[in-house]
Amino acid sequence: MPRNIHYLAAIGFTLGLGLQGASAQPDTLTLYSAQHPQVDAMLVAAFTKETGIKVRVHEGEGPDIASQIIQEGSASPADVFFTENSPELNLLDEKQLLAPVAPGTLSQIPAQYNAQDGDWLGVLARENVLAFNPDEINASALPPSLLDLAKPEWKGKVGIAPSDADFLPLVSAVIKQYGKPAALAWLQGLKENGAIYQDDEGVVAAVNRGSVATGIINNYYWYRLETELGADKTISRIHHFSDGDIGALINVSGAAILKSSRHQAEAQKFLAFLVSPSAQEMLGASNIDYEYPLRPGVSANKKLPPFKSLQPPVISVSQLGDDQEAGQLLQQAGLI
Amino acid sequence: MVLLPFCVTAVSAARGGISVAVDLLWRPLVGELLFNSLLLIVCTTLCCAVIGTTAAWLVERTDLPGKKFFAVLAVIPLAIPAFITSYAWLSLSPALETFWGALLVVTMSYYPLVYLPVAAALREMDPALEETARVLGNNVTAVFLRVVLPQLRPALLGGMLLVALNTLVEFGAFALLRFRTFTTAIYAAYRAGFSGAEPALLAMILIVLCLACLVGEHFARGKAQYGRLARGVRREAAKYELGGSAALAFIGFIVFAVVAVGVPLGTIGYWLTQPSDPATTVSPYSLSALAQATWASVRLASGGAALTLFLALPLAILATRYENWLTTLLERCAYLAQGAPGIVVALALISLTVHSVSPLYQSTFLLLVAYAIVFLPLALVSVRAALLQAQKQLEEAGRSLGLGRLSVLLRITLPLAAPGLGAALAMVFIATLTELTATLLLAPIGTQTLATQIWADTSTVAFAAAAPFAAVMAVLSMAASWLLARRFGTASVFAPKTSAGAV
């Protein structure tokens, strides 16, 4: 039965097929990124075009990648870590895992958005906001402060995503400003009041369809939803907290080079590229990211209110810390 | 190797110490998850039981018009991965991000697990008992409840427990619907703390629940034997005339088919025609991205299938040719893998390789190993059957004619069993192609498969962008299943999925 030999040949062939192409490429930069994949794809394509250096990307959530890098230690394949929230970079910095960023690159960005010790670089910024559905709640009834949302009258009217990486810095900021006990009480109030979603995308979509009246999100989720649905189907609106309220916290997206990287020079080039005029203008002009480019003189997407008009609380990126206490408090409050 | 994930998970769970474990497990979230998961499982299982049995009864035992067509339609959902069904429904309305949405999606994905064994049981049933009951004055309903249903019990219970097991380990469908169960919580815990004690602890609970289902299923099938003892030509089972309610049943079946098959496939078709927006599209739609993802999926699925078969073969040879307590134990252990969800296997392999076996970390081979562990039971069932069919006497004849053991294996046993091995290979290929969880966690950096692309796009609500990938995956999976069914009979495609636990 020679025909049946074909099956056996097929088995051998398929095994070979599965294993081919498994080897690592030596001249390729490895980027661990918690940015939105679309942003990465855009940046990487432009970087490779400009420098000829290839980049392979591992995507994930910021805290997840940060702990992954810690576990991988000196054997980590990562060269560059690009994330949406500064606390994850602070955490790696505390663990002495980051290499200093070239001073010439750091100086492109206002110093308050970089690590104090120069081990990571601020790239983009965005604002915490409250999305609301005008059909469910009057704009005049919206709270002046983020902390109000924990009050009993907000029961059932606020959507949150405590397991989203973007929620942690907000908790860190509340801890910083008001102390741990007050922050815990606030979280317990939110747990009582809140409709819980898996991530900010879930929150903003729920607000837009009217499942919940308001939702705590980062501003760009709303713009991304609007771009996907079109303006006519976007019923929800954005409420900006003002007067330095904690709810208007600015999150900084930043990048760092791993000490263990074997491609230090290429990695420095990538960071320099991230804050170069061409990359920053591309990010500002695109309908993809909706973050504020941090390079002075580069304007953000026209749909966003000017960066200068925002009224964030006065908390520096180093004061914001590494989110470790925030994670513990979220567990204590039963939110994660 | 199969026990490895269990051990690694147990060790990681224990590493934190008792007080940490108590703290982590004794928090409100775990109770909530347990409640969510159990409630969903109970509801899904009951819905599947009712729908599966009704459909099976209508197709097998009535004069429903067009029932041959319905018989095919009823099993199609098994060839569509649950996370694709989930994607399709979710893109219709985000309001399905609730318990009811989750219930709808898993019920529509898994009811064939009840339908198939129940339909088979209805076909095989001896008509004599029903006729006797009718003669004794029972109406159709009473006959069904008193005579048919009790006979269906093993098939029905077995199917229901398989539904429960599949619901327990399902990840993608729930994650997309943003419905929290144990699998999504393990994934979230992994994201928050990589491979710490917390995901391992949650995984332990999940494993215990899965093993409970497996054991339950084993007993449900093993205990009762309602087969006909008498030999001779079997008469065809009794058929009932639907009469006036035929139209009603027909319409009902059409509606049901639209919900179960029409919606997933129709939605994918609809999104294919929609432009995808670059703001939310992960990878801008391009033929090359599609081709690359398809190639990566096919490549990994082939490798996974081959490695699985490579491992299943010696195990099956030992179990069928050298049967003793040790080989039986080995075989049983392999079936235990059914109690280890993909997410648990993947996490265990990560924590194992990140520290100790680092060359394998993030390698393609590790992903293939994960596939092999998860799908070993699937392959084992049909490899075992194939070897049992290859007659031992022929091997003995070969031996007596002077062939060595290896020559007998290569020249007699394997060629005889080859069609069965081919079927096993194809089955694991399909299963691997549509696998999401392990692929998501273990795919080497830069490798995008159809599954990971659909996942990435759907998580950022870019439904139109996900459509081409979903379409390719659905078509590949259905085409492969159809080919397999044509070549080896319907049973070869679906029976192992529904009976592996019983062996």
Image (cartoon, coloured by chain):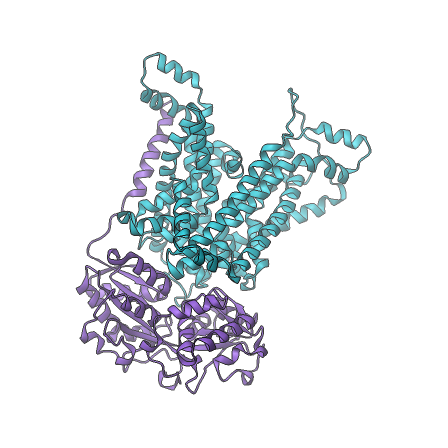
Chain colours: A purple, B cyan
In front here: A92 or B83? Answer: A92
Quadrant in the picture for residue B196:
bottom left
* Left or right of residue B484, residue B157 in this image: right
Q: Is residue A327 left or right of residue A81?
A: right
Residue at the location (31% across, 54% down)? B445
Q: Is residue A159 above or below residue B214?
A: below
Q: Percent x, y for residue B308?
A: 38, 38
Residue B304 visible at all: yes
In screen coordinates, is A218 left or right of B404? right
Quarter-wise, where is residue B368 in the image?
Answer: top left
Residue sitting farthest toward the right: B137
Q: Position of residue A170 (x, y in %)?
A: 42, 74
Residue B498: image quadrant is: top right
Front in this rendered view, residue B151 or B95: B151
**Residue B8: x percent and y percent?**
38, 47
Q: Position of residue A5 (x, y in %)?
A: 35, 27
Q: Nearer the viewer, residue A262 or B407?
A: A262
| Quadrant occupied by the N terminus of chain B | top left
Residue B183's place in the image compared with B483, above or below, is below
Q: Is residue B396 above or below residue B314?
A: above
